[in-house]
Amino acid sequence: MAAHFDRRLRKAALTTTVAAVAVAALSASQAPDVTADGNGRQTTADNAPTSDTPSQDSATGNSPYYTDLPPLNSPSPAPTTGTPSSPGSPEAGIPATVLDAYKKAESELRRSKPGCNLPWQLLAAIGKVESGQARGGRVDAYGTTIGRIIGPQLDGNGFALIKDTDNGVYDGNSSYDNAVGPMQFIPSTWAWAGRDGNGDGKEDPNNVYDAALAAGHYLCRFDWDLSDQDDLDSAILSYNNSQDYLRTVLSWLEHYRKGTHEIPDGTGSLPVGRSDDPPTGIGTGTGSPGRGTGASSRPQTPGTATPGPGGSPNKPPTSGRPTDPGGPSTSPSTPPTDPAPPTETPTPTDTVHHLENAGATGFSAIAGDTFAKKISTRAETKAGEAVGKVRIRFTVLGDTDATFTGGEKVAAVTTDASGVAVAPALVAGEQTGGFTVRATVIGRTVPGLDYKATVTERVADALTSTGETELTCTPGGEFADPIEVKATLKGAVADKVAVTATLIKSKDDPAENDKGPYFKDADGKAVRTLTGRKTDAKGLLELPKLYADDAEGTYILRLTTPGGAALDITLKVAKAADPTPDPSTGPSTAPSTEPSTEPEA
């Protein structure tokens, strides 16, 4: 906290002139469709966030972020309206649509991944440091940002080096990747983490509903429990691997947990400080408001009037602005024209020629189980040499509900020194059948490598009756006692096992009988084979009521399961026996003592 307080004192000591320059630069960066900073950033590696893992393995590529800290005063529960008096001062209020997106994402994750315990305040904290809550809530009615929020290009010039992975689709840059949208995903991460949060059928990183839900899923992967501090720290660091980033996000998380309030869209305050600012806070030629204001790899066209936070146009300053070597651009879809370094060393990705299977084959699991074998892929050069530090994307394809651990159908893994990437464990769903897992190289077009996998039915090796194994009924009647069976596998309960019940002709003839006892379908018609019934969590299954037609005899009901378990139940249909007369009430054979009434002959 002492460091945080010292930072506040330093900021308070800035002259009015310097502050005005910062605010002017901030306002200028709010141009519709594309905003600026890129080449005005500090380009020394000393000011980039420190990282112990590859930048490609974070959501943002370890891009810059806002460093402003929460206000010292407690959040006010009362709503505020209008434009904040100081665009550079932090504000506890969250724009209405942005706040709704965070809460909706929390609700969805509570349903789909309840063990993660994701709080919406964490999404709000990350949204604050990544984009200033979508630039103060500048979104349309559907949650899409008004103008794209694009971070500086990750060209290795003071930032990580991540070559283009999306052909410029998301960031307008076909040379390098840029972080995109209110939650600042790099394109290669969005390709597998993207979600449709507003139900419009699209996965758009520029939509706050989509981005918030994607961030939630990203933070909840690996079965992290965010109510546990260690897991929470790991999840935040996986988003941007910097200890300063972690501390900043945790500060805002605590602040929002104490209370916040909804404010109108477009009226939120905009941060100023950014992690790649010079040590003095604001330096010559680097007065950019940062990535959260939509910093791109090229500056905004000088002299363009743009709406400021209060809606009035503000002209960008005429001095202190960087010059784009490739010339200004007003189109967000036009790739930047920054010249490549004279001697550019190929990245490991550039050297990948093909992928090879690096492990097992024949992937199979019973429904609901985890696959015993993991998929592994080796990246190789044309000469067959291993390529390390390459990102491999594993994607589950086909009509299946199988996923990787954590419930995701896509996973990105970096190859080790031996060129091998091991996918997370596959978990079989309840849907049986075959599917494919495809391995591809992120950032390079080489043929993918397909792995075939199969999910088989749950099995049982024993079926037992919980009641009688011989039941009786009169012709045209119904069997009074229900039939209940229990399935087990190696002595343990076998749940969700399919049981087939068939009235067969005899023990030696398993063909379906055409007479005798029967079940009824939904229309009341007789059926003598039941399928699709499964045991419950205790391995139990109770069959529907059985009826008898007029044919007397002894019949067999045979129950079977995948795995070979079988059980026969005997059913007898017979008329009720005549009651035996009581000897004490039967007709007498003794001679009568009554006088005869017959006339004598």
Image (spheres, rainbow, N blue to C red):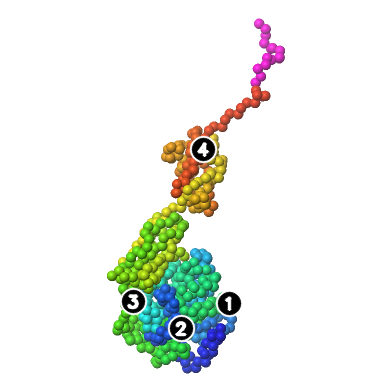
Instruction: Give the main secondary structure, helix, strand or loop, of the magenta stretch.
Output: loop
- Per the image, the residue denoted by label 3 is 347
Q: Can you give x and y, in whole percent of width and height, for residue 181 in the image?
A: 42, 76
Query: Which residues are the magenta region?
Result: 587-601
- Pick the residue in front: 322 or 366: 366
Task: Say which label, 2 or 1, has the lower sequence index.
Answer: 1
Q: Residues within 10 Å of mark 2 (few under 14, many from 20)?
A: many
Quick check: marks 2 and 1 in contact, CB under 8 Å? no
Residue drawn at x 39%, y 89% is: 321
Q: CA distance from mark 2 to mark 3?
A: 26 Å
Instruction: Residue type at mark 4: give it.
Output: Leu
Which is nearer the N-term, disc 3 or disc 4?
3
What amino acid type should be assigned to the residue bearing mark 3?
Thr
Which residue is labeled 2 in the image? 275
Indicate the secondary structure of the residue bearing disc 3. loop
Can you tell which mark lies on residue 571?
A: 4
Looking at the picture, which amino acid does disc 2 mark? Ser
| Circle 1 crowding by C-alpha within 10 Å: few under 14, some 14–19, many from 20 | few
Asked if residue 109 lies left or right of residue 78, the reply is left
The image position of residue 208, as x and y in percent, is 46, 73
576 on left or right of 284: right
Kindly state the secondary structure of the residue where label 1 is placed: helix
Q: Is residue 370 left or right of residue 343?
A: right
Which residue in the protein does label 1 denote?
A: 258
Relative to 495, residue 123 above or below: below
Q: Is residue 158 above or below residue 518?
A: below
Disc 2 is placed on an element classified as loop
